[in-house]
Structure formats: C-alpha cells, structure tokens
Amino acid sequence: MATQNRYFLYFLLSFFNNHYPSKSSQLIHVFHGRRTPSILYKVENEQLFPAFGLFKELKKEHLEHYLQILSSKKLLQGNEEDGYLLTSLGYKALTQYFEHKKYPSAIRSLENATLRNSFYLQIQLISQIFSEKRYDNKKYSPSIKEPIDQESVKEWLSKQEKPMAQLALQWATELYDLLLMFTEEEASIIVGKLTGHDIIGKTNRQLAESLEMESVELNVRLNNTFEKLIIQSKASEGLLLNDFVAYLDQRTYLGLSKSTYDTYLMINEGYSVEQISEVRQLKLNTIREHILEIYLIHPDFNIQPYIPVDQYERLNRAFEQNSKYSYKQAKQDQEDLMFMWFRLVEIERIRYGRENARADTL
C-alpha cells in the first residue's frame, strides 16, 4: 500500500471484522470520542478501544476517502450505506503488517480514555518543575502553556506535604524505576517528550523523525505508551505518580461524562436509581443510561443491584441457547423487559467470552 498514510490505513483496517459492518458515520464518532450508549457499546463489542477519542480533528469526508482506498485494495468489502466488512485478504494483510509494526495493545478498555491526554501533558509539566527545582532555577518557560493544565499541576503540588526538593528527588527516582519496566523504545518515547534543566523535549515531528515513524504512528504509540505508564502508576501504591494519577482521575471524572460522574457519586452514597432521578430531576431512562456508561467504562462496576435475579438468570439462559440473542427477540419473549437489563447482561457476557478466549491462547 504505497502511501504516506500507510500506518494509519492499517490502523484503521484493524477496527473492522467480518461480523459487524462499520460505516464512516459510526467510526467518526469513535475517533472523536463521542459518549452515546450506542457508540460506547460498539467500542466495547468490537474492541475499538485504541481508536476512541484519538483523532478528534479527523473529518468524515477524509475517513470516507480512506475507507474507499481500503475497499479498492479489496481489503474491505461493502459500502457506506450498508457498512464495510473485513475481507480474508484484509485479515491476511493486517496480520502481516503488524508482525513488523507495534499495535497499541495496552489500551484494552475505556477506563483511561479521558485521563490519558491530561496525564500526557501534565506529567511533562511536573517533570520540568521538579527538574528546574533541583537546579534551583526559577527563570524558565513552562513547556505546557494551557492554563487548565498549569492550574491542575499547581493544585496537586499544593496538596503535597513534603518539601519541593524532596518531592523532586522522589519523582525522578520513581519515574526512572518505572521506565525500567518499559522497552528501550517506549522509554525513549516518554523521555523524548520531557523538558528539564537545559533539556528541551522534542516535538512530535522531531520525535517521529528520530524514531523513524510516521506522525500518526507516533501518535498511536504515544497513547499506548502513556496508557502503560498510567497502568503501572495505578498499580504502584505509595508512589507520587500513583497519587498524581488518582488526583487526575478525579479531575477527569473517572473517565465518565460529568453528568454520569454525578450519578456515580450518588450511587456510591447509597442512592437508588429512582432516588437519583428524583433528586437530580432527570428522567429514569437517563439514569439508566448512566448505569450503562459506568459499566462500559468501569468493568469492575457491580451490576447485580440493577437487574432482578430472575431476569439475570433468564437472560443468561437465553444467551447460552443463542449467542446472537437480540433485544428484539428478548422483547418478544418478555414484553416488559427493560433495555438496561438486557444490555448489562450482554456486556458482561461479551467480556466473559473475551476473557475465556484470552485464557485459551495462554
């Protein structure tokens, strides 16, 4: 595929399969990070996690053009009206390409989708502040200019009880230790973005050139590498990085929309769906959509309180008899079935099947 967008085209191709047709009108919402229940479900069901919110400036007409290129190469079949499916030739080409290129395999959920960009920017600013502090240099220009990021970092630093000099040494030590868990290339990607005393972080173009990557490939790899750093930081209790990620997670609403986050807080306080609806003066269906969003973003969310036991068991039996059991069929079987019940069980079974498939490959 002779094109300067080679990596992007194969990356795009990876979001197609031979079961669920996809259209540009759907994928553009995935790339833009739209948070409707239908888009979030599509991301979960088809494992489109690395694409979510990654290309917010991508235009639909450009996406359509790329799909036409893949279709002309017989890597996809179909059209915009009915959707595109991956062909056997496309699957073979995709497999061969990513035998030699890195795929963003660390991004396996939507849990850090909104956290990742803030973390990526603010870790650069914090590292610069601590680096300049160790050299007692107060006359420097911040590498990250956005007021919202600067205010966030300032607030986090104000919560720390240790002296800045001690924090600076601790931060550097922790970051170094964590980077030892990464490949040399991944560590180079992170360090390449950092600005410090007498060191200026590389622009994305400079970093892409130094690593001999296309700009889109670097963008994808940056997201994957910082996702890994977030995961490692979350798992490292007691570290400054762990504290910073937890702080930033709260500022970005734990990956939820603001309204869903407010519902989530009330759930944790023991409010029922009906009580939340009444207090917040929102429709019951809106709160139920919030429940679905919470579960789609946070796989460990307990769904049992939101499905009657008999409905949970009945739906599971139906799925066991027919893995393609649809909501339309479910409504025919039981007219008063609530969509939230159906979708929660369906999502749980999708994840259960995926985990079993992974276990079988180990």
Image: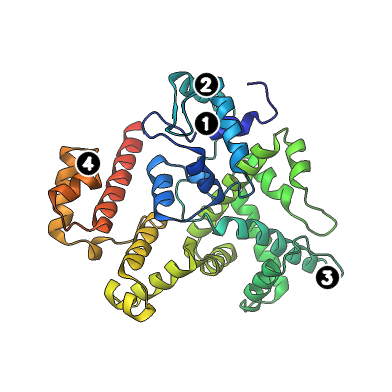
Q: Which residue of the protein is positioned furthest toward the front in this rendering? A: 81
Can you tell which mark lies on residue 93? 2
Residue sitting at 16 percent across and 44 percent down? 318
Foreground label between 1 and 3: 1
Where is residue 330 shown, x and y percent of the image?
A: 19, 48
Q: Is residue 305 above or below residue 100?
A: below
Label pair 4/1, CB-CB below 8 angstroms: no
Where is residue 2 shown, x and y percent of the image?
A: 67, 21
Front in this rendered view, residue 163 or 118: 118
Residue at the disc numbered 3: 136
Residue at the disc numbered 1: 13
Q: Is residue 99 in sight in this rendering?
A: no
Sequence-wise, which precedes: disc 3 or disc 2? Answer: 2
Sequence-wise, which precedes: disc 1 or disc 3? Answer: 1
Label pair 3/2, CB-CB below 8 angstroms: no
- Amino acid carrying mark 1 in the image: Leu
Location of residue 59 by image quarter: top right
